Image (cartoon, rainbow, N blue to C red):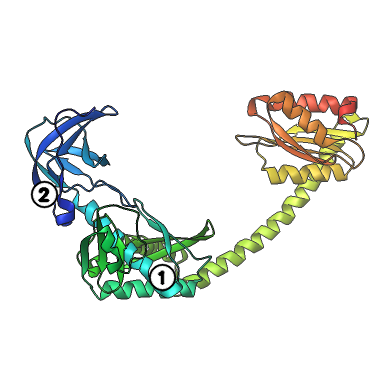
Amino acid sequence: MAQGRSRLTRRLYYEDSFLREFEAIVVDVMTREGAPHVELDRTAFYPGGGGQPPDRGVIDGVPVADVLEADGRLWHRLEREIARDVAVKASIDWTRRFDHMQQHTGQHILSQAFIEVASAETRSFHLGESEVVVDVDHAGPDAALLSRVEERANEIVWEDREVRVHEVPRELADRFPLRKVPQVEGLMRVVEVSDFDWSACGGTHVRRSGQVGVVSVLGTERYKGGTRVTFVCGGRALRRARERAGLLKGLCLEFTSGEADLPRAVAHLKEKSERAERRLNSLLKDALEREAEALIAEAPAGPHGPVVARHLPDREPSETGTLAALIARRGGIALLIGGGEEPRAQFSAPAGTMAMGELLGRICREHGGKGGGRPESAQGAIPRHAVEAALVAARDAVLAGRPEGCA
C-alpha cells in the first residue's frame, strides 16, 4: 500500500505534449502486485485513457513499465525501486509518444470526416500496437464512400491546421460544437483541430494537423450493427507502405512480371490452378472408386454387407468422407477414421441397413469422442489414443448385427 504523504502531481504532458525530458521529486512510493511504484511531484508520463495507451520511458535510468491513475494520483510502475524524497531525471519514450499523438489526432480528424461525409458518429476508439480502430455508426460504407472519407481527412491533415487545447468549466461546454459531451465534473479539456473538429479528450496530441502526416484506411468489417474501421497514420502509414511495396516487389520477382502486368499474371496462375484442381479431383475420384472396390473385396461379411473398418491416418476428412460414401454405394458398410490431431470418423451404410448415427454416437460416448448423424451417414471425432479400440468396437457391433446399430 502507499505510504507517506500525497501531493497533486503537475501534469507536464498537458502543458507541453512535446516535452521529452524533465526533472522531478519522488513524493511517494508503494508496492502494487509485487512491483515498485513511485509518485512524482511533476510528470510528463501520460497514464493512458480514452483509447490511448500509457507512455513508457525511464526514471533515473530505471525503466518505466507502466503508468496508471488511481484515485486522482499518478503512479509509475518501475522495474526496480527508487527511494522517496529524492530528485530524479526522467525521459519518456519519444518514438512511442509521437506515434500515439499522430494516431490520436488522426483519429479525431477521421472521426469528424466520417460525420461530415457519411453522417456516421464514432462509437469507440482503440489505439493498438500496430493498427488503430474506430467503430462508426454506419451499416456498411462502400469503397467509394470510404475513399471520400479518407480524402477529406487527408485534406485537413495537409492543410496543416492548428491543433488547440481549451480547458473550460463543464458548464461552458456549449461554447464548442462537440461531437459528444462527456459526463464529467469540473474542468473539461477540449481538443480543437482548427475550424473542423472539437472533441472532449484527455489524450496527448500534435500541435498541427500536418504532423499527423497521412491517414490511411486499411479496411473495414461489420461490428455490432455498425462498422469497425482499421487505419494508421504518420509513421505507421509509412512503414505499412514499405511493407506493401516489399511484398509487391517480391511478387513481381516471383512472377517475373512488372507491377502493371501482375494482375494478369495472377489471373493466369489462378486459371492454371483451377484447371489442375479439376483434373486432380477427377483422378482422385477414379482412384477412390478403385480403392472402394478393393476394400469391399477383402472385407469380412456381416449380416448387412461387407464391413470395411480402417484407420487412414494420412487422409483428409473430405477424402475419407468420399471413400465412405463410395463404399456404401457399392453395398458395403464403411467405418473409417482419418488422421490429424483430432481424428475424424466417417461411418456410412446403405439405406435401411444400419443406423450409423446411433452407432457412432455410442462409440464416441464410450471412447471420449463426440459425434452422430443420420442412419446412412455419421461424422464425429475420436481421441487419437482411442482410435484403434473405437474401430474394433464399431466393427464388432456391425459384424454381430447388434440391435443398437440396426436401422
Q: Position of residue 296 (x, y in %)?
A: 85, 37
Q: Which of 368 and 184 is in front in this view?
A: 184
383 relative to 100, above or below: above
Q: Is residue 3 left or right of residue 288?
A: left
Categorize mark 2 by other alpha carbons within 10 Å: few (<14), some (14-19), many (20+): some
- The residue where tag 2 is placed is 21
Relative to 255, 344 lies left or right: right
Between 400 and 155, the one lying in front of the other is 155
**Residue 297 image point, x, y percent:** 87, 37
Q: Is residue 335 placed above or below 168 in the rendered structure? A: above
Q: Please identify the quarter of the rendering in which residue 101 is found.
A: bottom left
Of marks 1 and 2, the one in the foreground: 1
* Mark 1 residue element: helix
| Quarter residue 321 falls in | top right
Q: Can residue 55 be seen in this view?
A: yes
Residue 173: % across, % down: 29, 63
Mark 1: amino acid: Ile
Marker disc for residue 319:
none
Residue extending farthest left: 87
Q: From the viewer's perspective, is 283 left or right of 235?
A: right
Q: Which residue is drawn at 26% across and 55% down?
A: 203
CB within 8 Å, label 1 to label 2: no
Residue denoted by label 1 = 115
SS for dot 2: strand
**Residue in view at x 74 percent, y 39 percent:** 379
Q: Earlier in the sequence, mark 1 or mark 2?
A: 2
